[in-house]
Amino acid sequence: MFSAMDAFALNKHNTAFNHDIVGTDESLSVYILVVATGTYAIKINDLDAIQTYHAQFPTKGKEKKEYKRLNRIYNSHYNPASGTTGDFDDYELDFANYIQSKGISLYKAENDLSGWKRLEFDADNPTEVKKTTCNEN
C-alpha cells in the first residue's frame, strides 16, 4: 500500500510541476501502485490540506518518523508466530484512515481497469472502507 513518503512525494511533485502555471488543476498529479491485489492511485483533492499536512514535517528526519509511524500501523497486522500478514482490505482501511483530512484521495481500479472506485474511511463504519464508483461522485 502507499506510504507517508508517497503522500509527501505527491505534494512535492505537484509543487515542482505546477508551481508557476496559472489555472493548473492540482488533482492531475497522480501516483499509481500496481500490486497482486489490484491497481491503486492517489491524487490531491485539497491542495491547502496536503500542503498543511506536509508542512508539519519540514525535515527529512521528521518525514522518516512519519513514515515509520504509518508502517507501525501496517505492521500491526503481522503475526510473527504464524508469519501471516493482514489482507489488502486491512491496508486499504489503514491508509484511508491515515489520509482522511490530509487532502489526498485513494482509488482502486476495477480488475479489468474499466473503472475506478474512491476508497474512503467512514467514521460511521470504521471497520470497512467506503467505496464510491467514480462516475457516481
Image (spheres, grey):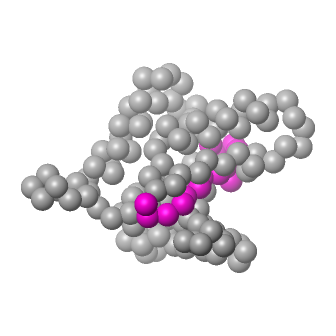
Q: Return the x and y of residue 42 as percentages of the image width and height.
A: 60, 52
Q: Nearer the viewer, residue 91 or 65?
A: 91
- Residue shown at the point (71%, 77%) measured from the top left: 136
Q: Return the x and y of residue 1 as percentages of the image width and height.
A: 44, 52
Image quadrant assignment for residue 47: top right
In this view, the residue farthest toward the left is 81
Q: Is residue 4 above or below residue 121?
A: above
Answer left or right for 71 relative to 97: left
- Can residue 46 be seen? no
Which residues fall within the magenta stretch? Answer: 36-50
Image quadrant assignment for residue 50: top right
Q: Is residue 113 above or below residue 95?
A: below
Tell me the quarter of the image containing the C terminus: bottom right
- Residue shown at the point (76%, 45%) measured from the top left: 26
Answer left or right for 122 relative to 91: right
- Can residue 31 be seen? yes
- Residue shown at the point (68%, 53%) measured from the top left: 45
Residue 137 painted magenta: no
Q: Return the x and y of residue 39 as percentages of the image width and height.
A: 54, 60
Q: Nearer the viewer, residue 87 or 63?
A: 87
Numbered disc total: 0
Residue 46 painted magenta: yes
- Residue shown at the point (38%, 63%) measured from the top left: 88
In this view, the residue farthest toward the right is 22
